[in-house]
Amino acid sequence: MAGSREQFRSRLGFILAAAGSAVGIGNLVGFPVNAAKNGGAAFLLIYALFVVFLCLPVMMAEMSLGRKTQRNPLGAYKAIGGEDSRWNFGGWLALVTPFMIAVFYQVLTVWLLGYFIGAVSGNLDAMAQPGYFNEFINGNGVFMYLFILTLLIGIILNSGVQNGIERLAKVLMPSLVIMLLALTTFVLTLPNAFLGVEYYLVPDFSKIGPEVVSNALSQAFFSLSLGMGILITYGSYVSHKESISGGAKMVAVVDTSVAFFAGLLILPAIFVFNPLTNPEELSTSSVSLVFTFLPKIFLSMQDTLGYIGANLFASAFFLLVFFAALTSQVSILQVPISAFQDELKYSRKKSVIALGITSLLLVLACTVSFGRIEFFTQFLNYGGADKSFFDLVYDIFYDTILPLNGFIVCLFVAYKWRLSKLDEEMAIGDPKFLGSFTHRYVNFALGTFIPVVLLGVFVNTVCIKFLGFSLIGALG
């Protein structure tokens, strides 16, 4: 049987753990290129506005719901919804979503581990070759890395919230920030680096249109782990002595700061490699950039650093991104672990084992979706293109479902739980909350325009991914 519910040992532990769930591959790679392609500082401004005025209220709602109910997402919906079982759909969706996100994210994290080991081994020259990535992901070595990673994550999750997740975050998140700042400082000293800074920080408002605004909103929403059930689950481990409002704001600051400084690393590094780079030609795919483009950039640094120095730089970068992916993966997996404990009354050890067994076949199906097995490589055709099993999982559970989950959370909190109950929970540990600007704004935003915006993003994403057209583009 599950014991009494754990709590984070400290406010710092909660902030670092929640920030660890938010900071991932998209922050460190996808965000900088999106900014460079879509107006530089103009994109950054829109992104920041969305974080403050749209994402923070949703963060606070999810965290408050978790702390109030002391349950996982499904349990939270059941506890507040009571006999009205229609709301349980939102709970199931918020539970299945992180489980499926963890499936494809496990594959990405395995690749990062393999590339880190490759760079440490002095294999950068081979990693920069055009066919290396395809050979790597279809080689037998990925299964060895998958076993190592699964064992590592299992040990962390089995250690619990305080001794596993919180302790991991307290080590890896400061390490990540230190490495990011050190790498950024070094890159900015290289020739042509400030060409990248110019593309990144000089605003170009002429590039701002409906699609760019939608991309900025999606980037902000996804970046902060909203709609994944993570913040509901993590909220259930937060002490009533802590301020939900203050914690949410700090998580947003850490997450946004990491994304911003990643831009000061990635874009200058690209321009050091090729001063004539056209940001419009850069892929927004984090996978393409990390595993095929960036190794070429790191190899080019051997003219300045020597081959060993270039391998060390690449090793530090891949370790940086691996840390970000590992903290995210552990946070995502804590959601179904919590559900096993709450709903089935499993012990933590039994929950970790059950999760590993139930996810194994799906992870393996994603792993072999890149040419190794034709059935999973050509799994479906939608949106005018053939899609692998990995593509299907990614498109549904990362690119599409999250805003729908956020929409349901907003409706549930505002109209089932009621905003007055949210106010009571937010005031616990923060007596100054009631009557503040944050209080008034959160109440107004959650009950009016935020659900409408999230529903619009969800519908438009479905049209883009599965029907091959954009409603925003058509209207624009």
Image (cartoon, grey):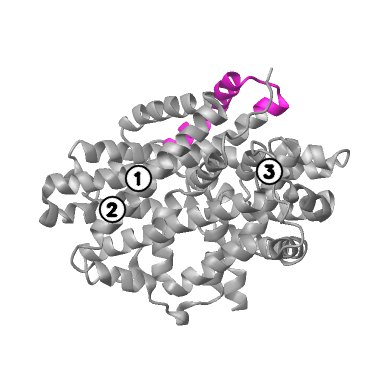
- Side of 467 where 423 appears, left or right: right
| Image quadrant in which you'd find residue 301 | bottom left
The residue type indicated by label 3 comes to: Leu
| Of residues 396 and 278, the one drawn nearer to the viewer in this rendering | 278
- For numbered disc 2, what is the local secondary structure? helix
Nearest to viewer (mark 3 / mark 1): 1
What is the residue that sits farthest to the top in this orientation? 1
Secondary structure character of the magenta stretch overall: helix
The numbered mark at residue 433 is none
What is the residue that sits farthest to the right in this orientation? 83
The structure residue drawn at horizontal position 23% and vertical position 48%, both measured from the top left corner, is 313
The structure residue drawn at horizontal position 62% and vertical position 70%, both measured from the top left corner, is 471
Indicate the position of residue 238 as horizontal and vertical percent values. 64, 39
* Labels 2 and 1 touching (C-beta < 8 A): yes
Per the rendered image, the range of residues in magenta is 340-367
Q: Is residue 99 above or below residue 200?
A: above
Nearest to viewer (mark 2 / mark 1): 2
Q: Is residue 308 magenta?
A: no
Return the residue at label 3.
93
- Side of 200 where 392 appears, left or right: right
Indicate the position of residue 205 as horizontal and vertical percent values. 47, 80
The residue type indicated by label 1 comes to: Leu
- For numbered disc 3, what is the local secondary structure? helix
Numbered disc total: 3
- Side of 446 where 383 appears, left or right: left
